[in-house]
Image: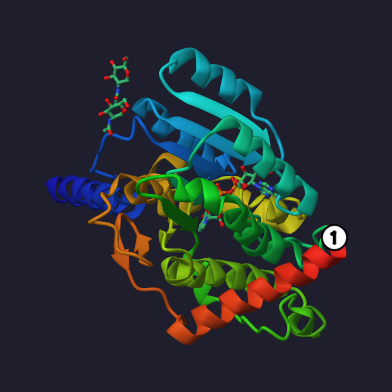
Amino acid sequence: MWLYLIAFLLALAIGYALRIYLRGRECKIRRDISNKTILITGGSKGIGQETIRQLANYNCTIIFGSRTKPTEFLNHLNKYYPQTTIKYIPLDLQNWKSIQQFVEQVNKEVKKIDILINNAAIMGTLTREFTSYGLEAQFGTNYFGPFYLTQQLLPLLKKSDSPRVINVASVAHTYEGLDFNDINCDKWANSIFWSRIYTYRAYGNTKLSLILNAQEFSKRTGIKACSLHPGVVRSEVLQYQLSSKWFDWLLKILWPFFAYFTKDCYYGCQTTLYCIMMSDNQLVDGGYYDNCELSKPKYTSKERAEQLWDFTLELIKKVEKEQR
Ligand SMILES: NC(=O)c1ccc[n+]([C@@H]2O[C@H](COP(=O)([O-])OP(=O)(O)OC[C@H]3O[C@@H](n4cnc5c(N)ncnc54)[C@H](OP(=O)(O)O)[C@@H]3O)[C@@H](O)[C@H]2O)c1
Ligand SMILES: *[C@@H]1O[C@H](CO)[C@@H](O)[C@H](O)[C@H]1NC(C)=O
Ligand SMILES: *[C@@H]1O[C@H](CO)[C@@H](O)[C@H](O)[C@H]1NC(C)=O
């Protein structure tokens, strides 16, 4: 009898310890960011929203952009954090004009940007979707749109004493098939075997691109950058999958297990906070962070980072011509 009880308590303790381990670390460092202006994409939900909620404690200026305006969230923060300035500006990274209008508005609101966080993204579109500028939707939303946005914001970043760019990437970058001759993943999408799951490979491409972008960033702009993996987080990033019936079912059945092994948004935003709170000396330029520590991404190289940057600049020229 005693033996059973001890075994049970032991299992409980181990289960709990494992859960603490799985949910990941908290950002333990703090600094005074009260004079900083922070711009974050996304923020209407998920990790981005939780990042803003945490930053609201620091009396800084926060600007965020997404397609939907989270009115309740905004009202709440403005009421309880009057020392922090929080502004929402509409932004659709799939729409060229919208990015330009966003930048125009940002220039009216602030004189500088100290920290830019490219957080917004979509994952695993179930059908083939394209942006207003003709790119595969994930590549446009997660990488190309943010690249263009960041370029447009460089003058404001350069007004800061110590600007920083943070790209929210993913461990999914290991599931990449980045091919400059097939940037929309047509080959995968049209293949009999891969057409169903090409979408995750397209997502992986965007996340690898964000990591490569951070590695190349300071060489091209003189501004420090880093990238990160937030962990597997119970945000709304699965919305596309949930719209398919079988996945909805699967998730319902497996939800307790899923919850046990994943992070909520509070833990999901800790590595982003870590990248914000590190001093300039601590931050490794071009570094890739995971679970509040420096980590090593896969499939990156100096050549690939350079190639991608040049490729993207060319693509911008092309799109600019078409969008005129
Ligand atoms: N959750 C995970 O397990 C996980 C794992 C690894 C990496 N990540 C990364 O973490 C970041 C945050 O994701 P999340 O999990 O918080 O996802 P989420 O809950 O789906 O939030 C995504 C955010 O991006 C915005 N967004 C999407 N499309 C946009 C567009 N066209 N223009 C402007 N904003 C757009 C959304 O706002 P609107 O819909 O209102 O536009 C939303 O605020 C993403 O970069 C994601 O790839 C997440
Ligand atoms: C923030 O700005 C104020 C006013 O310019 C200045 O007195 C203060 O030292 C600044 N704080 C930091 C941490 O730079
Ligand atoms: C924010 O401002 C409030 C009120 O002035 C102050 O009490 C608090 O300590 C400040 N917090 C930070 C992190 O600067």
In front here: 11 or 152? 152
- Residue 256 visible in the snapshot: no
Labels in figure, total: 1
Is 289 placed above or below 273 here?
A: below
Residue at image mark 1:
323
Residue neighbourhood size for the residue with mark 1, other residues' Cα within 10 Å, grouped as few (<14), some (14–19), many (≥20) = few
Instruction: Give the residue displayed 61% in from the left and 21% down from the top.
Output: 72
Residue 88 in the image: state x and y as whole percent. Answer: 62, 31
In front here: 134 or 46? 134
| Left or right for 273, reference 282 | right
- Looking at the rendered structure, the secondary structure element under dot 1 is helix
Is 129 placed above or below 109 here?
A: below
Instruction: Give the residue displayed 40% in from the left and 29% down from the top.
Output: 60
| Left or right for 139, reference 255 | right
Is 57 placed above or below 270 here?
A: above
Residue 128 in the image: state x and y as whole percent. Answer: 82, 66
| Left or right for 3, reference 45 | left
- Residue 104 visible in the snapshot: yes
Instruction: Give the residue displayed 50% in from the left and 44% down from the top.
Output: 47
Instruction: Give the residue displayed 36% in from the left and 61% down from the top.
Output: 289
The quadrant of the picture occupied by the C terminus is: bottom right
The CB of the residue at mark 1 lies under 8 Å from ligand 1:
no
Quadrant location of residue 292? Answer: bottom left
Instruction: Name the residue at the left extreme.
Output: 2
Residue 67 in the image: state x and y as whole percent. Answer: 71, 40
Question: Disc 1 marks which amino acid?
Answer: Gln
Quadrant location of residue 28? Answer: top left
For ligand 3, the image quadrant comes to: top left
